[in-house]
Image: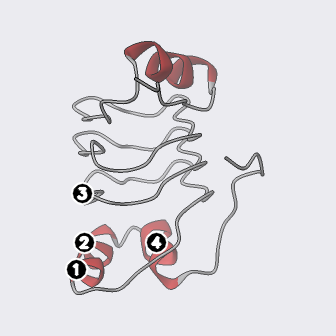
Amino acid sequence: MSHQNPEIKDDPMYRLLREGEVEEFNARRASGETCDLTGCDFRTLDLRKLHARGLDLRDCYFRQSDLRGVDLSEANLEGASINAAKISGVYFPRELSADEIMLSLTHGTRMRYRKD
């Protein structure tokens, strides 16, 4: 896990998300386009329609972003932070405990997966 500050990358797929083009991102990803979203800054973005299955979101920063209803159960959120994000209806990965999620939501801690 890296401990770098979240960054705004020049990846074209990431730029789609930053510009609010979530459905275009989903369509291009479904057609096979790849992206590198690790360590990205998603602060305040509306990601409600994101198809997150299989996304590597390690070390991402979701402060005050809108994630309502997003299925993150098959995304990698190791080291991500969701401070003050809107998370109603989010389906988190099984490896994240409710305590980890709450600590990140209220204090901005980076989420750690439990190793069963």
Q: Which amino acid does label 2 sit on?
A: Glu
Is the C-beta separation of discs 2 and 4 under 8 Å?
A: no
**What whole-number distance in Å separates the C-alpha atoms at marks 2 and 3?**
7 Å
Q: Which of marks 3 and 4 is in front?
A: 3
Q: Residues within 10 Å of mark 4 (few under 14, many from 20)?
A: few
Q: Which of marks 2 and 4 is in front?
A: 2
The quarter of the picture where the C terminus appears is top left
Q: How far apart are marks 3 and 4 (CA)?
A: 14 Å
Q: Is residue 73 above or below residue 101?
A: below
Q: Name the residue under label 4.
A: 19
Q: In the rendered structure, are the residues bearing label 2 and label 3 in contact, judged by CB atoms less than 8 Å apart? A: yes
Secondary structure under the numbered disc 3 in the rendered image? loop
Residue under the point 54% across and 54% down: 42
Residue 79 in percent (x, y) is at: 59, 40
Tell me the tag on residue 48. none
Identify the residue at image location x=61%, y=56%.
Answer: 41
Measure the alpha-carbon separation of dots 4 and 1: 15 Å
- Dot 1 corresponds to which residue? 27
Mark 1 to mark 2 CA distance (whole Å): 6 Å
**Of callouts 4 and 1, which one flags the residue occurring earlier in the amino acid sequence?**
4
Q: In the structure shown, which secondary structural element does the residue marked by tag 4 occupy? A: loop
Label whose residue precedes the other's in the sequence (1 or 3): 1
Q: Which colour scheme is used?
A: secondary structure
Label 1 neighbourhood size at 10 Å, few (<14), some (14-19), many (20+)?
few
Q: Residue furthest top?
A: 99
> Which mark is first along the chain, 4 or 3?
4
- Residue indicated by mark 2: 23
Which percent across, then down, holds residue 21? 35, 73
